[in-house]
Amino acid sequence: MSNLDQSKNAQLWRVPLAARPRHLSSFLAAESNSFGVVRLAMALAVLVSHSYLLAYGISSAEPLHSLTGHSLGEHAVQVFFFLSGILVAQSFDRSRSMLDFIAGRVLRIFPGLIVCVLLTALVLGPLVSMLEPARYFSGTGVLNYIARTLSLSTGSAPLPGVFEAHPLPSIVNMSLWTLKYEVLCYAGLALAGAAGLFSVRWRKATTALLAVFLFFVFIEKPKAIETYTSIDNIRYFALFFGMGTLAYLVRDWLPIHGAVLVPMFGLFVAAIGTRFGELATALFLGYATLWVATLSFGPLRGFTNRYDLSYGAYIYACPIQQLFIETLPGAGPLVAAALAASIVLPAAFLSWVAVERPALKQRHRVSEAVSGAVRRHLPFRAAKKISA
């Protein structure tokens, strides 16, 4: 390789620690950031983290858990929600209407999820179940799994005779439990947006109110995430999602510079185990995510911008990991994670190409069809009320 080629490669992977600060607004365009790379890395981090939990049956088996009070997978989900706060806020701000925004969110979550759940219940389930196919399908267990999982009511719904003898028994796809809170965050953002969160006239006031809300929303003595109530979970995820939304609101004034990470990391470490731990985590991980997104990562950025494998990797990982634990019980967590990734990534690619991307392309068509249907019925209803 020539010196010129080496210089070009160095530029592609450069670390702009001492570079001039960039504001968030300058790299919000997809081709200007590496959000796709970060999302894919976080999906794989969840896969690695869950390998320890699935292999040993206890969350404390994951090495990072004892250091920060959270596993690698939990920190990865925190980053997911932070990035979602930015990107969904941007989507709302640019949407043609509320219906257009809702259509975009529904089409992002459910088509891929529906296919994943049906493949899991109707194909994988009968193949690995301890029951004969006739018994597997005879009761209501399969339908209950499909209904409960697609309704987002739980990520712990079992399938008849599936993975029952594992260290974490009867868990089919535990990653899906966070989707309910993702959707709740979407709903909260839509309500706040309708109330004027993105109004140019009131931008400073609404930004200040959101900042105050986020400061107080999750200040409490630390406890294990497994003991959180539903209200705790809402507050917890709202903190990270809201921090991303706040970053979007101050995008024109938010400088991103590597040097800032040093004091923020110190604050993060100092706050571990205190009532300010989650707030400090949201600040540090959120800012670190934005800084990493300024790196180019060479051709990987272009690939992840074109093929968003993060959601597919997230929703397919757990059942495939459980499958390897079933077939190779002696394999360690890292081996199981590597084997699972070799299947998960192609599955995620197929999900994006065949399901997720085609569904997202229908966003405006769906919102316009729903809007047209509403307009066609409103005059009829109004006339009916008048004549009555």
Image (spheres, rainbow, N blue to C red):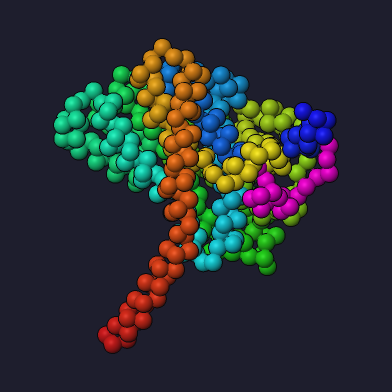
Residue found at x 59% / y 51%: 87
Front residue of this view, candidates 68 and 340: 340
Camera sees residue 255: yes
The residue shown at (43%, 17%) is: 56
Where is residue 127, by image quadrant?
A: top left
- Image x and y of residue 160, in percent: 24, 30
User: Residue at position x 44%, y 30% from top?
Assistant: 343
Q: Residue at x 32, y 79 (%)?
A: 381
Left or right, 203 with reference to 120: right
Q: Is residue 117 magenta?
A: no
Compared with 342, 302 (above or below) is below
Left or right: 48 in relation to 385: right
Residue 231 shows up from this direction: no
Question: Can you give x and y, in whole percent of width and height, for residue 62 in the image?
Answer: 52, 20
**Residue nearest the viewer, comparing 38 with 60:** 38
- Specify the segment rendered in magenta: 17-36
Rendered location of residue 260, percent (x, y): 78, 37
* Residue 144: % across, % down: 26, 40
Q: Residue most toward the front? A: 2
Q: Please tell me whether residue 229 is drawn above or below residue 130 in the rendered image.
A: below
Q: Indicate whether residue 20 is drawn in magenta.
A: yes
The residue lying toward the viewer, choosing from 38 and 64, is 38
Asked which quadrant contains residue 180, the reply is: top left
In the rendered image, which quarter contains the N terminus? top right
